[in-house]
Image (cartoon, rainbow, N blue to C red):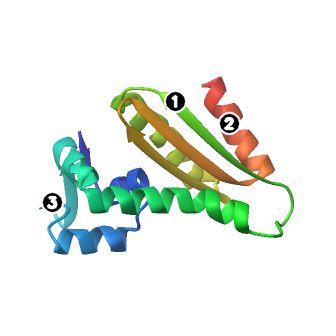
Amino acid sequence: MAYNLNDVAMITGLTTRTLRNYLKLDLLTGEKIDGNWSFTNEELDAFMSNPAVKQAIKAKRNAVVYDFLSAPFKKGNRICTIMDLPVSDEEALETANFFGDLVNKNGRDIIFKYNTEKGYARFILAGSEDQVVDFMKAYYER
């Protein structure tokens, strides 16, 4: 399977700008095809197993929860949910794409992060109560 820069951003939680910096530093390798970056599973695995990158991904992912907990006042009802699922890498990517598509289409007030490690995937959704509940219902009804 091939991933583009936006896919890698969604998978890692890092911005495309940060990923471009990693490309310049040769921490992330890929192939430019017709002006767009393309990354294989192996390239993505090598990138995400780099200790410095692992720490950056973990910090970015955990920042969602930390920011949610540290904000003293919320506008309306807010939810932050964490799902840890024992799934294969393929199932993790499928679930990440499911939530990513929902966020892209309907996520006016949602933050979504995910990470996989050793047969598990962690999905974090934070945002308005209505949207997070709707996203979770859609996940369990699919």
The quadrant of the rendering that contains the N terminus is top left
Q: Which residue is mark 3?
A: 29
Q: Secondary structure at mark 3?
A: loop
Which quadrant holds residue 36? bottom left
What residue is shown at x 21% (from left), y 42% (from top)?
A: 41
User: Mark 2 or mark 1: which is in front?
Assistant: 1
Q: Which residue is mark 1?
A: 85
Q: Which residue is mark 2?
A: 136
What residue is shown at x 40% (from left), y 50% (from top)?
A: 11
Separation of marks 2 and 1 at Cα, in angstroms: 14 Å
Query: x, y percentage for residue 42?
Result: 17, 43
**Residue 9 visible in this rendered orientation of the protein:** no
Q: Secondary structure at mark 2?
A: helix
**Amino acid carrying mark 1 in the image:** Leu
Left-right relation of 46 to 83: left
**Residue 113 visible in this rendered orientation of the protein:** yes
Separation of marks 3 and 1 at Cα, in angstroms: 29 Å
